[in-house]
Image (cartoon, grey):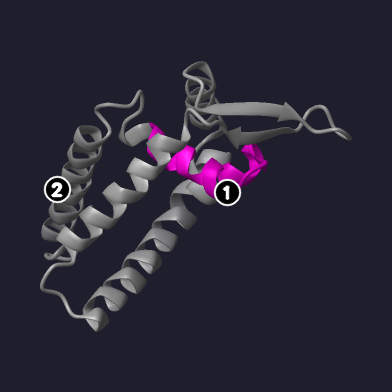
Amino acid sequence: MNDNFPNLARCISIVDRLMKMYYDHGLADFEIGWGQQFYAEYVYDHPGVSAQEMVKYIRVDKATLTKTIKKLIEIGYVTSVSDETDRRVKHLYLTAKGEPAVKKIKEIHRDFYDTMCSGLSAEDILLTEQVMEQMMENINQKVWHRMEE
């Protein structure tokens, strides 16, 4: 094992926890938190998206996706419309009630990103994003195949 791993893992864990706290606090006036914000924003950015498409992008199991979408529908942020040609496929749309929440999510994104990247050069930010993407892909290849089994 690489001796640097414990520090990298600790940093990732701390950033993850701080992001959750930041988003939960910022979304306190809405009926969602960290766990639902990705889904609501994705539906907003991709009107008519299907659950199958979201599974691939968000990289979450179908049960978690179903549970989260069900909550967003129950609170009135998302509506589900059956496909006209294949009734098994449901298309998701953000409702007018969900729009203020997504606007707040996007504001929180900007604020968090600006805070997190304060004092870093554009080159360092780009390199960090590229490295994190590759790390995510490396882990995804190992873990996702196990989830599919």
Task: Give the residue number, with chain letter if any, for mark 2.
Answer: 14
> Which image quadrant is residue 101 in?
top left
The three-letter code of the residue at mark 2 reads Ile
Please provide percent x and percent y for residue 88.
78, 28
Q: Nearer the viewer, residue 47 or 67?
A: 47
Q: CA distance from mark 1 to mark 2?
A: 26 Å
> Which image quadrant is residue 90 in?
top right
Q: Is residue 142 magenta?
A: no
* Residue at (55, 31) in percent of width and height: 95
Of pointers 1 and 2, the one earlier in the residue sequence: 2
The three-letter code of the residue at mark 1 reads Lys
Task: Give the residue number, with chain letter if any, for mark 1.
Answer: 56
Q: Which residues are magenta?
A: 36-55
Label 1: how many Cα within 10 Å (few below 14, some 14–19, many 20+): few
Please provide percent x and percent y for residue 130.
36, 73
- Dominant secondary structure, magenta: helix
Left or right? Give the position of 96 relative to 120.
right
* Residue at (22, 46) in percent of width and height: 16
